[in-house]
Image (tube, rainbow, N blue to C red):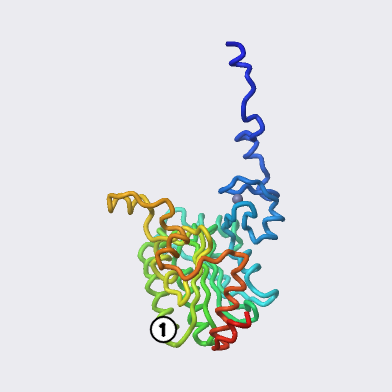
Amino acid sequence: MKDFFTKKKKYATVPSAKARQDVPEGIVRKCPKCKKIMYVKELKKHLFVCQSCGYHYPIGAYERAEMLFDADSYVEFDKNMVSLNPLQFPNYMHKLESDRKKTKLNEAVWTGKGRIEDCECAVAIMDKGFRMGSMGSVVGEKITRLIEYAGKQGIPVIIFSASGGARMQEGVLSLMQMAKTSAALKAFSENGGLYISIMTHPTTGGVSASFASLGDYNLAEPGALIGFAGRRIIEQTIGAELPPDFQTAEFLLKHGQLDQVVPRAELRTVLGRILSIHTEGSAEAWDRN
Ligand SMILES: [Zn+2]
């Protein structure tokens, strides 16, 4: 009996929950998929993709802009546009303020223009760190302005989606942004504009049901969750179990709802190809790449 109590723990080398909590976030990060611990510096070098299992860490809008554009080629638009509290939703302003501090953004989307592989384009990048990337009036307005600007300049639009959907605290004003952004894209498209949508983890709700799905090219990052309603709601509604990979980028590609799943490390090259074909207007551009 004594032996039983004094027996050494079989998994003594695995750090305890307490020790894991003590891992300093700013220096190392643990991969949520394969649990490998890596230096942030090393992760940054690999565009925040786990080199062990390929997991794509969600990244902030400023980090994304930095790794996307040609060096020193981009500028930000409408940086100071901020949300009001039209419904007087309790605590809303306080939550916005705390997310501003956390992300350095004033809203859940970064917009601007810059060059990718030497092609000028207008780009929006959503940041899920800001109110889960939810779309309120400012997100819709910034994206609509960007599309209209690109239309006037005759340059392509690229939107990186990362969103939990419409923003609850702005009620119907949030839902209106779905129609507003979609209408702007329709006018842009009728005018011959090129729009590339890139869905990153997660692209759900009202964002997936509006501009994120309207690209001339619909691309996604590996492993991204993409869908309108959550798995549980669908299972309850249809009374059936869904496959385990349901609503992943790979599942959508297999079922014809995406054009390509593009690893982060290849994204600039893929975008460069698409942009050069459309701006130079010939297949030679593709061959050259
Ligand atoms: Zn991993």
Q: Is mark 1 within 8 Å of ligand 1?
A: no
Say which residue appears at 49% left-offset and 57% top-offset.
132
Q: Quadrant of the C terminus?
A: bottom right
Amino acid type of the residue tagged 1 in the rendering: Ala
- Nearest the eye: 221 or 109: 221
Q: Is residue 73 above or below residue 201?
A: below
- Residue occupying the point 62% across, 14% down: 3
Q: Position of residue 169 (x, y in %)?
A: 41, 59
Would residue 187 be found to the left or right of residue 108 on screen?
left
Percent of width and height locating residue 144? 46, 76
Quadrant including the N terminus = top right
Residue occupied by mark 1: 187
Q: Judging from the image, what secondary structure is the residue with disc 1 in?
A: helix
Residue 229 spot, x, y in % from top left: 37, 57
Q: Residue at x 37, y 62 (%)?
A: 171
Most distant residue in the top direction: 1
Judge whether 223 appears above or below 213 on screen: above
- Is 172 situated left or right of 155 in this image? left
CA neighbours of label 1 inside 10 A, class few (<14), some (14 to 19), many (20+): some
